[in-house]
Amino acid sequence: MHLILYQRDDCKLCDEAVALLARTHMPDFESVWIDDDAELEARYGERVPVLRDAGSGRELGWPFDAAALQTFLAPEA
């Protein structure tokens, strides 16, 4: 699973998402800032932070909590 967290610079909600990921001992993830990227800006805009599984294309948008994160990370049946 290749996880990407889309976020912005100076984003309080993004900081909260990163803190939650750290508290829940989240697997490694890549941080991608959408600032100055027109394509990502158009796609995610005000939706950030968004956690994306690059393999499946599934996305988990903010707000999410530890339970939602666990469900998102669970293998699909």
Image (cartoon, grey):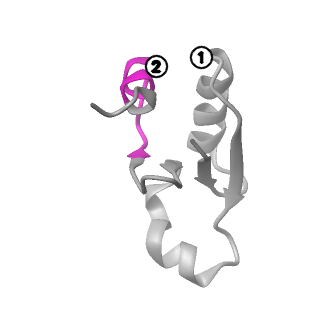
Q: Is residue 43 left or right of residue 76?
A: right
Amino acid of disc 1 = Thr
Q: Is residue 45 above or below residue 62?
A: below
Question: In front here: 5 or 2?
Answer: 2
Q: For the N terminus, which image quadrant?
A: top right
Residue positioned 43% across, 42% down in the render = 62
Task: Please give the label number shown on residue 24.
Answer: 1
User: Is the residue under label 1 in contact with that under label 2 (CB below 8 Å)?
Assistant: yes
Q: Residue 22 at what x, y percent from top left?
A: 68, 23
Task: Please give the label number shown on residue 66.
Answer: 2
Amino acid of disc 2 = Ala
Q: Is residue 69 above or below residue 25?
A: below
Q: Residue 76 at what x, y percent from top left?
A: 33, 34
For the residue carrying disc 1, how many other residues have a C-alpha within 10 Å: few (<14), some (14-19), or many (20+)? some
Question: In front here: 1 or 21?
Answer: 1
Q: Is residue 61 magenta?
A: yes
Identify the residue at the far bottom of this view: 38
User: What element does badge 1 sit on?
Assistant: loop
Q: For the C terminus, which image quadrant?
A: top left
Residue positioned 50% across, 53% down in the render = 55
Task: Please give the label number shown on residue 12.
Answer: none
Distance from the alpha carbon under mark 2 to that under mark 1: 7 Å
Residue positioned 41% across, 46% down in the render = 61
Q: Is residue 54 left or right of residue 76?
A: right
Q: Is residue 57 left or right of residue 34?
A: left
Find the magenta span and give its range: 60-71
User: What element does badge 2 sit on?
Assistant: helix
